[in-house]
């Protein structure tokens, strides 16, 4: 602690210096036309600002890992029982720390960008990119300042409160940093994309010095951001899956869904690249929406405008400020507070709106927004162009679906705002609406179905004649209808009475007949698509020497998407849940299944150290037909603040999981032990297909990113060789 008086620590002063220096950097870049040496002034300001930000951040991290309870942040989120990594994870587990960490990452990325392209600072695209990046960095630093990470305690506590028990695990050390890194990586493609939109001429970006380098850098950073987003979302889904109460691997929670938005925009940027060509507005707009989506996700999380397990609770002090000017029961007060419940998110709300409007305004200015971005003509529906047409239809369907998902996220807010305006009352229309999972599942079914059908003519069987593709598609649709009807008969027991319960058809297909008619309709089409992609992948490996990496990566991407969808559909609609109560020595059948559970031991322990005050362990063996499937310990614990937590046990087979949670215990007050344990057992068939698909997705994006990096490296190498040759030639001319 470096206390300098007036209730201020030195860390806060250094952070303010960083903010002012970064603002100066943006000012010098903007004033470049009027200052001869603006590049030098700007770089000095950036160096001071970035250095000050890094020093203050590392000082902040030092306070956390050394548990300096003089600071309010440390006492609020850290306690002495947490190990080094859990202490460090409190940085991104809180509102002030997450802004600080995000600003720290962007400062490194932005500084590297400036150094890499400093020689082209005079070009319009570059200095406009610099301005946008500097302003966004300054905004995040300002948000960090007003959240006051260096706030001092009036009275120093002996220990801190620590994190929420759900965050006390290794996944909190891994998942959030990757998400924030991906968010930071989205910034540079966005600022470059908006700068490109500002210079469009007849729909195209004109030539300029350093264009080839910038294009290569742009492609690499977009693919790197896509890779990081993919890894972050997948790890988040797995963390949700193994954590009690977070709705399985994907619950369409508003913040989960919002995190998907930037990923979808970047995905459709890559998906539509083959036919963008002269549509520079559309491609750059999609990339810019990637970072705007991250800002939007942050706004949803930090503002609390939507109800979410991820959202921070707003402080509500904005209402006190506004009440000096607006009556509390006036509808205008309700409108403002519905959008911005906390004054601290006012700036990020403004950042979202300005950044969102900027590419649209530039599109209107250049008249690009009025062009039909992807037009379909009669020629597109000829046999010779069926692949391109299918790709376009798939792209359009996916993009429309993305915007409808986005609309679903903000629909409750729009509904409430309209209610206030229509009624001219602070009560609005009650009750408010909620957008639940069935809405998003329907959107995915409709627009994902269109994409799936389109892919039959584009990717799944590319070398088969179009007539054969129609036949395959019709066959898949018919198979889907029959599969859905037979699924209804199976679940009603009609099929078993007709064919017999031990019929091999029922035994095999019974594993795949889900409780969802929509899922049963599309599963045969998906399996047909998977078969087609596997055949195509083998053909590429065996015969295609040209563009092997790109083509195999694309095929693997489509294959991974389908496997993820199949795994998600089957797992979500065939899972079985039951509750049982067990005691020591129990050996019983789990009703509704062929499984047995043998309870070896129930024990209560009081750890001498660590985060838990009491552990209740249920030790068991799961078997089926006399064959042991797995051994596990399911734990219910109480921490030192009397907060109850659960450690989920998952027993995995090749494709399916048995998910066991201790929901409650019955403690013996006399002996201090517990005699009964209430377990929830969930069987999730084929869920590991989902994780296999996720692995294939990363496996497909990774070589694409490496390829972009090698291309960028080659561009810079060629540029350096040309420069060296020019210099050598100049030296020879001077000698002559």
Image (cartoon, rainbow, N blue to C red):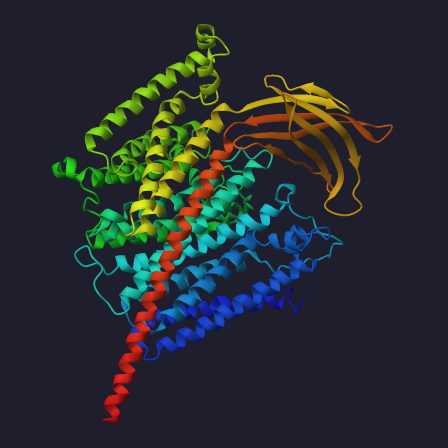
Image x and y of residue 722, in percent: 28, 75
**Residue found 65% across the figure and 58% down from its top:** 64
Image x and y of residue 271, in percent: 31, 45
Q: Residue furthest right?
A: 670
Q: Is residue 723 visible?
A: yes
Is residue 431 or residue 488 the one in the foreground?
Answer: 488
Is residue 296 or residue 479 the one in the foreground?
Answer: 479
Q: Residue furthest left?
A: 378
Image x and y of residue 477, in percent: 30, 23
Q: Is residue 323 visible?
A: no
Image x and y of residue 125, in percent: 29, 64
Q: Is residue 121 above or below residue 604?
A: below
* 583 sits to left or right of 352: right
Callout count: 0
Q: Quadrant of the C terminus?
A: bottom left
**Residue found 51% across the figure and 37% down from its top:** 307
Q: Quadrant of the N terminus?
A: bottom right
Residue 24 sits in quarter? bottom left
């Amino acid at each position: 602690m470096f206390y300098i008086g007036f209730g201020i620590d030195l860390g806060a002063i250094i952070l303010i210096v960083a903010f002012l220096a970064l603002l100066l950097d943006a000012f010098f870049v903007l004033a470049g036309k009027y200052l001869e040496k603006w590049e030098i002034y700007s770089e000095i300001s950036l160096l001071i600002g970035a250095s000050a930000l890094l020093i203050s951040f590392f000082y902040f991290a030092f306070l956390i890992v050394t548990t300096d309870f003089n600071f309010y942040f440390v006492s609020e989120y850290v306690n002495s029982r947490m190990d080094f990594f859990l202490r460090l994870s409190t940085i991104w587990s809180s509102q002030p720390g997450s802004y600080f960490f995000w600003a720290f990452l962007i400062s490194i990325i932005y500084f590297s960008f400036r150094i890499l392209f400093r020689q082209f600072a005079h070009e319009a695209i570059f200095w406009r990119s610099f301005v946008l990046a500097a302003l966004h960095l300054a905004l995040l630093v300002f948000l960090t300042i007003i959240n006051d990470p260096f706030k001092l305690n009036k009275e120093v506590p002996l220990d801190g409160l620590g994190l929420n028990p759900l965050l006390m695990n290794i996944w909190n050390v891994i998942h959030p940093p990757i998400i924030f890194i991906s968010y930071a990586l989205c910034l540079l493609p966005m600022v470059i994309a908006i700068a490109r939109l500002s210079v469009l001429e007849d729909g195209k970006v004109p030539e300029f010095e350093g264009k080839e380098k910038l294009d290569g850098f742009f492609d690499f950073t977009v693919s790197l951001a896509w890779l990081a987003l993919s890894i972050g979302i997948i790890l988040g889904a797995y963390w949700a899956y193994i954590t009690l109460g977070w709705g399985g691997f994907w619950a369409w929670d508003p913040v989960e869904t919002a995190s998907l938005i930037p990923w979808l925009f970047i995905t459709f940027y890559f998906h539509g690249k083959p036919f963008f060509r002269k549509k520079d507005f559309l491609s750059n707009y999609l990339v810019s929406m990637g970072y705007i989506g991250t800002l939007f996700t942050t706004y949803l999380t930090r503002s609390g405008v939507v109800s979410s397990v991820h959202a921070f609770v707003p402080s509500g002090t904005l209402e006190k400020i506004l009440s000096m000017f607006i009556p509390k029961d006036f509808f205008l007060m309700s409108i403002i507070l519905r959008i911005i419940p906390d004054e601290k998110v006012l700036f990020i709300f403004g950042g979202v709106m300005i950044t969102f409007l900027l590419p649209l305004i530039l599109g209107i200015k250049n008249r690009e927004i009025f062009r039909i971005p992807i037009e379909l003509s009669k020629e597109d529906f000829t046999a010779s162009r069926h692949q391109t047409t299918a790709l376009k239809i798939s792209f359009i369907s996916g993009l429309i679906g993305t915007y409808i998902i986005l609309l679903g996220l903000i629909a409750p807010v729009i509904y409430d705002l309209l209610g206030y305006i229509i009624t001219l009352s602070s009560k609005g229309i009650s009750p408010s609406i909620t957008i639940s999972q069935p809405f998003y599942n329907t959107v995915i079914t409709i627009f994902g179905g269109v994409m799936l059908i389109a892919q039959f003519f584009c990717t799944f069987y590319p070398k088969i004649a179009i007539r054969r593709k129609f036949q395959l598609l019709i066959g898949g649709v018919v198979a889907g209808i029959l599969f859905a009807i037979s699924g209804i008969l199976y679940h009603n027991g009609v099929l078993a009475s007709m064919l017999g319960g031990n019929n091999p058809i029922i035994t095999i297909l019974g594993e795949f007949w889900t409780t969802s008619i929509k899922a049963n309709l599309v599963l045969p089409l998906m399996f047909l698509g998977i078969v087609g992609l596997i055949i195509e992948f083998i053909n590429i490996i065996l015969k295609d020497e040209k563009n092997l990496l790109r083509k195999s990566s694309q095929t693997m991407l489509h294959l991974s998407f389908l496997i993820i969808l199949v795994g998600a559909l089957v797992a979500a609609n065939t899972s079985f849940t039951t509750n049982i109560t067990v005691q020591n020595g129990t050996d019983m059948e789990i009703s509704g299944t062929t499984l047995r559970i043998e309870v070896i031991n129930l024990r209560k322990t009081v750890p001498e150290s660590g985060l838990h005050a009491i552990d209740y362990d249920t030790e068991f063996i799961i078997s089926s037909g006399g064959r042991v499937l797995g051994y596990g310990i399911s734990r219910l614990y109480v921490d030192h603040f009397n907060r109850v937590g659960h450690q989920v046990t998952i027993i995995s087979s090749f494709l399916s999981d048995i998910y066991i949670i201790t929901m409650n215990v019955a403690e013996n007050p006399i002996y201090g032990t517990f005699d009964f344990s209430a377990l929830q057992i969930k069987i999730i068939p084929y869920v590991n297909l989902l994780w296999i698909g996720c692995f294939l997705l990363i496996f497909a994006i990774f070589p694409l990113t490496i390829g972009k990096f090698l291309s960028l490296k080659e561009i810079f190498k060629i540029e350096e060789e040309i420069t060296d040759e020019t210099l050598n030639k100049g030296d020879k001319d001077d000698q002559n």
